[in-house]
Image (cartoon, rainbow, N blue to C red):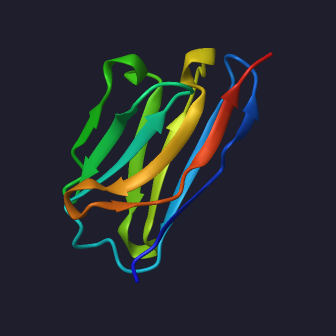
């Protein structure tokens, strides 16, 4: 079974930073697209950032300039560096290979003073 496991969430103050990590149980080398989604309390799950096998990235407007997605194919890892966090960034962050309908269980990020 293929697994995606997120880690790195936690409580951070506004303006702070966190780095989320997604570890895959199998190689991600041939997965074309990997992504981070976010589900804020009481809201639907939305795309935050994605990255292709050729390292092309895409970001939601709300996080552009603050978040950076990256992947390390050799280590089967996907990262989301989050800087300048705001209260509105609070939510459960999910790692995904959306074209494969592959999802992790999520990691909670809470931005609060």
Q: Picture coordinates of residue 31 (x, y %)?
A: 24, 67
Residue 15 location, x and y as percent?
A: 67, 17
> Does residue 7 lie above or below 61 as drawn?
below
Residue 6, position as x, y percentages in the image = 56, 57
Q: Is residue 6 above or below residue 61?
A: below
Residue closest to the eye, 102 or 111: 102
Image position of 96 (left or right of 53): right
Numbered marks: total = 0
Which residue: 30% across, 44% down? 50
- Given the current orientation, which residue lies at the most extreme front position? 42
Q: Residue at x 70, y 17 (%)?
A: 14
In the image, farthest residue toward the bottom: 1
| Side of 77 relative to 98 (left or right) | right
* Quarter of the image that includes the N terminus: bottom left
Nearer to the camera, 66 or 96: 96
Q: Where is residue 102, by image quadrant? A: bottom left
Q: Looking at the rendering, in which quadrant would you find the C terminus? A: top right
Judge whether 10 appears above or below 77 on screen. Answer: above
Q: Residue at x 75, y 21 (%)?
A: 13
Residue visible at 34% across and 48% down in the picture? 35
Residue most extreme to the right: 113
Percent of width and height locating residue 83: 57, 27
Q: Nearer the viewer, residue 9 or 76?
A: 9
């Amino acid at each position: 079974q293929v697994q995606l496991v997120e880690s790195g969430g936690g409580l951070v103050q506004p303006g702070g930073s966190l780095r989320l990590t997604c570890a895959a149980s199998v190689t991600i080398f041939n997965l074309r697209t990997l992504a981070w989604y976010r589900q804020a309390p009481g809201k639907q799950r939305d795309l935050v950032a994605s990255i292709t096998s050729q390292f092309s990235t895409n970001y939601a407007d709300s996080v552009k300039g603050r978040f950076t997605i990256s992947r390390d194919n050799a280590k089967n890892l996907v990262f989301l560096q989050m800087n300048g966090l705001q209260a509105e960034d609070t939510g459960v962050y999910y790692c995904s290979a959306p074209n494969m309908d592959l999802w992790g269980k999520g990691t909670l990020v809470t931005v609060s003073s």
